[in-house]
Amino acid sequence: MKNRSEILFLYDVKWANPNGDPLDENKPRIDEETERCIVTDVRLKRTIRDEWLSWGETIWVSGEAVSPDERRKDLDIEKKEDALKCLDVRLFGAVIPISKQADTSYTGPVQFRPGTSLHAVKVVFQQGTAAFTSQAQAQQRSFREEYLIPYSLIAFYGIANENAAKITGATEEDMQKLLKAIWDGTKNLITRSKMEHNPRLLMRIVYKEGMNYHIGELDSYLELQCAVDEKSIRDISEVQLKVDRLLEKLNQNKDRIDRIELKQSDRLVVLKDGAPIRLVDELTGMEIEVVNLS
């Protein structure tokens, strides 16, 4: 991987818990000041890794309840460099326990900030009956309790650092696997607490080779226009994404940009100057090459 790049990923959830906090009754993580939803980078990486596992990729952090030493033996990792056969180590880095070696860590070239919703959200408490009684002799079923968010449009921002990739050996092919797993893995989150996770926008800004530069904080240039009160949003049709500032920033830096890789849901309405646009048309009009992600 010879080019630095930035990733902007938007997805929404309906009546789900996008990232429960085990230290707080598994409630959705909320910024108390802004009332916006928070999703950790660990949760996004879990989604990506699970998708990779379904493809048969070799992964260091598999999600299984095993010790690092057991995992190392399972993957036949005898020395630090052996860990680089794992796709997630090449991209995300890892700490690998190798006996008699002091330096056992890799810093991954791909780093994500915690995701945050682009609007304030409402948290709903629900109760329901469990499928079975709590004890063998009990006649009454036990109750289950859960906290859900009716709707949230969440934005993630990340950077792929070509300098760190020189150490881990991360390739452009690895990056394409990452992008595919972000989109498809989110779509494939079909569990009781995670269904109705829908990818809406994935953008990767690839800078020219040797350009030791990136714009930064791409999500801060987005603004949501809502047809209802923020906490009353229940569907993507009730919001529109204003990208005026993002497009302005991209236009200012177009001489540094090699290409932009893009995928967008047809249900996401994007606005510039208050009117709906096609992102691909706007970017092409700036004379930026656009590559559609599969």
Image (tube, rainbow, N blue to C red):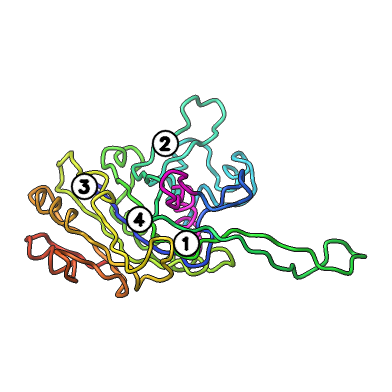
Q: Is residue 40 magenta?
A: yes
Q: CA distance from mark 2 to mark 1?
A: 22 Å
Q: CA distance from mark 4 to mark 2?
A: 32 Å
Q: CA distance from mark 2 to mark 3?
A: 19 Å
- Which tag is nearer the camera, tag 4 or tag 2? 4
Q: Residue at the spot x=75%, y=63% of the render? A: 143
The span shown in magenta is 30-56
Q: Residue at the spot x=41%, y=47% of the render? A: 34
Q: Residue furthest front?
A: 229
Which kind of residue does numbered mark 4 sit on? Answer: Leu
User: Left of 207 or right of it: where is 139?
Assistant: right
Q: Is residue 87 magenta?
A: no
Which kind of residue does numbered mark 3 sit on? Answer: Asn
Q: Position of residue 60 (x, y in %)?
A: 51, 47
Which kind of residue does numbered mark 2 sit on? Answer: Tyr
Q: Residue furthest right?
A: 137
Q: CA distance from mark 3 to mark 1?
A: 25 Å
Q: Label 4 belongs to which residue?
A: 118
Q: Label 3 belongs to which residue?
A: 3
Q: Label 2 belongs to which residue?
A: 106
